[in-house]
Image (tube, grey):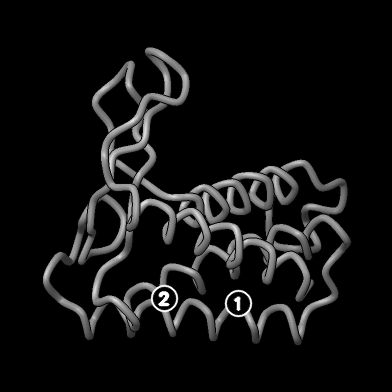
Amino acid sequence: MSGWVVAICVCLDQALKAWMIHHPQPRVLIPGVLGLTYTENTGVAFSLLEGSPFLTVGLSIGLLGMLCVYAWKSRTTGWERVCVSLITGGALSNLLDRCLRGYVVDMMEVLFVRFAIWNLADAFVVTGCIVWMGMLLLRKDRTEHGVG
């Protein structure tokens, strides 16, 4: 795992969240495409488990623990390490919100379709997962890793 990538993810996400807390009024960033709308999410993705703080914190800690064990015990490539770091940074930043505020600050809204409002940490987690899964599926030595 790359500590720098994790730190950058947490710092960028927390800075944007702090800015949104102090400037909560809705804004359009890209007309018809992307806007900022301040919300407080007490659940996890798509507000699942809303109102269950101990469960959401426990799930976050469990995920982070598994990622740390995986990163420590596995022989990851450079890009795989970046993916694990993106996922870890996003999960850690949202865990900080849950522990410090009791909710996760969400703000990014897709304007051309009705979709969940999300944050930068969520984008880091999703990007890390998509790229990592793509790498696993496209690996030449797929049978060694239980794929294919």
Q: Dot 2: few (<14), some (14–19), or many (≥20) neighbours within 10 Å?
A: many
**Residue drawn at x 54%, y 86% as measured from the top left:** 65
Residue 107 picture location, percent across and down: 35, 45
Q: Is residue 142 above or below residue 67?
A: above
Residue indicated by mark 1:
67
The numbered disc on residue 95 is 2
User: What residue type is disc 1 on?
Assistant: Leu
Residue 34 location, quadrant: top left
Residue 129 picture location, percent across and down: 58, 52
Question: Is residue 92 left or right of 131 when viewed as pictured?
Answer: left
User: What residue type is disc 2 on?
Assistant: Leu
Question: Is residue 66 left or right of 108 when viewed as pictured?
Answer: right
Residue 135 picture location, percent across and down: 75, 47
Please, what secondary structure does the residue beneath circle 2 have?
A: helix
Q: Nearer the viewer, mark 1 or mark 2?
A: 2
Which part of the image, by quadrant, shows the N terminus? bottom right
Question: Is residue 68 left or right of 41 when viewed as pictured?
Answer: right
Residue 79 picture location, percent across and down: 82, 55
Earlier sequence position, callout 1 versus callout 2: 1
